[in-house]
Image (cartoon, grey):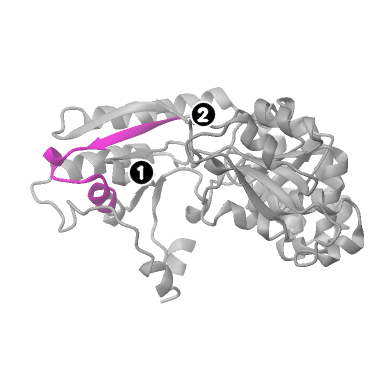
Amino acid sequence: MTIRERLGLRPIINVSGTMTTLGASIIVPEAIAAMAEIASQWVEMDDLQRAASTVVARLTGGEAGFITACCASGITMAIAGAMTGTNLLAIERLPDDTEGLKSEVVIQLGHIVNYGAPIDQSIRLAGARVVPAGTVSVTQDYHVREAINERTAAALYVVAHHTVQYGMLSLEEFCEICHAKGVPVIVDAASEYDLRSFLARGADIVVYSGHKFLSGPTSGIVTGRKDLVRAAYLQNRGVARAMKVGKESIAGTIAALEAWEKRDHAGIRKREEAALNLWKDALQGLPGIVARIIPDPTANPLDRLQIFVAPESRFTAAGLASALAAGSPPIIVRNHEVERGHFFLDPCNLHPGEAEIVAERLRAVLTAKDRPADAMKVARKDSAGALRWPD
């Protein structure tokens, strides 16, 4: 029996992407080997993090870096570090006692997203107050400039498909305004492929997920200015104690970073393109279905298949996504926009042979004579399932 069978877990095929709710990514063999090798060893954790800092700095162009539990914890640590600096007593006083500290964080309103939890909570966990700038549809330069005052500790810039994709200030504009007033800029680049550009474009600290495109264990990578990285790392003596990372994840993330340097990125891209074309061809000529290959909205070197579902298919987008998830094997699509009549297929987390299974299942579901009972269901928000856990 496989581990999924032993634990009673469904053997899903992931065409949703690097989603935390699905386990994030397929960990590369180099990271698995490093995690297994260090698991039985004693290490001095600060020295292990020093080794990580060297690798992180080389890969990202930062002055220093470290590994933490995830990107969300890295954001909290970076913000807390901007508030306390290296004042160890101030670190122990967070999050409720911020007397004498700068404790406001500016963020564009269109960047206050939910990635499974609200990003403003990562700010508030540090003890900081969220200061939204602009509106949900547009941020002007003066919105950010006037939001900064003597209490501003940092500014947070979010790079994600969840954010409003128009009308916001660019990273360069945002950094220029903040730096003119002496405010450091922290970038949430959790699911971004490019490890170097955000620092090069002006950010002071960048936080990545180690478990998404890098295909490492669940982890966060903090990189940037040495003084800010040091202050963020020291939060392990305070609020980040609850966010600590094990030696296995640190070693695995180091190995994933080193493997990234040698990865056949062009070969991976070619395999992904083949899967996309296979799926698009499988959907050709089906009533009510239109499929097109589109680029990633944040300019990652990745395309996805966008599938538009019209009533002629006798499905809604939500109904078709549900039918695929309920099948055997279950196929989980990228369904965060089903209420707009479409969903996406992401090719970046496929095991060999799975692209063909997805193509076959798409065709089978859409050409079947009968439709499931919820084929025409309307997308709606429903938290009932979450509230039933662990039942």
Crowding near pointer 1: few (<14 within 10 Å), some, many (20+)?
few
Is residue 318 highlighted in magenta?
Answer: yes
Circle count: 2
Residue 308 drawn at (x, y percent): 26, 35
Which mark identifies residue 268? 2
Q: Relative to 176, does residue 69 appear above or below in the rendering?
A: below
Q: Relative to 391, does residue 13 appear above or below in the rendering?
A: above
In the image, taking residue 349 as reference, residue 159 lies left or right, namely right
Mark 1 lies on residue: 337
Is residue 328 highlighted in magenta?
Answer: no
In the image, taking residue 52 as reference, residue 267 lies left or right, namely left
User: What's drawn in magenta, residue-wise?
Assistant: 303-323
Measuring 39% from the left and 48% from the top, which residue is drawn there?
A: 13
Residue 366 drawn at (x, y percent): 17, 42
In the image, taking residue 216 as reference, residue 203 lies left or right, namely right
Measuring 86% from the left and 47% from the top, which residue is drawn there?
A: 230
Crowding near pointer 2: few (<14 within 10 Å), some, many (20+)?
some
Question: Can residue 35 be seen in this snapshot?
Answer: no
Q: Nearer the viewer, residue 283 or 329?
A: 283
Secondary structure at badge 2 equals helix
Residue 248 drawn at (x, y percent): 72, 56
Q: Amino acid at mark 2?
A: Ile
Measuring 59% from the left and 52% from the top, which residue is drawn there?
A: 119
Separation (CA) of disc 2 from disc 1:
26 Å
- Give the mark nearest the N terminus, 2 or 1: 2
Instruction: Farthest residue to the left: give it.
Output: 369
Secondary structure at badge 1 equals loop
Q: Are marks 2 and 1 in contact (CB under 8 Å)?
A: no
Q: Amino acid at mark 1?
A: Glu
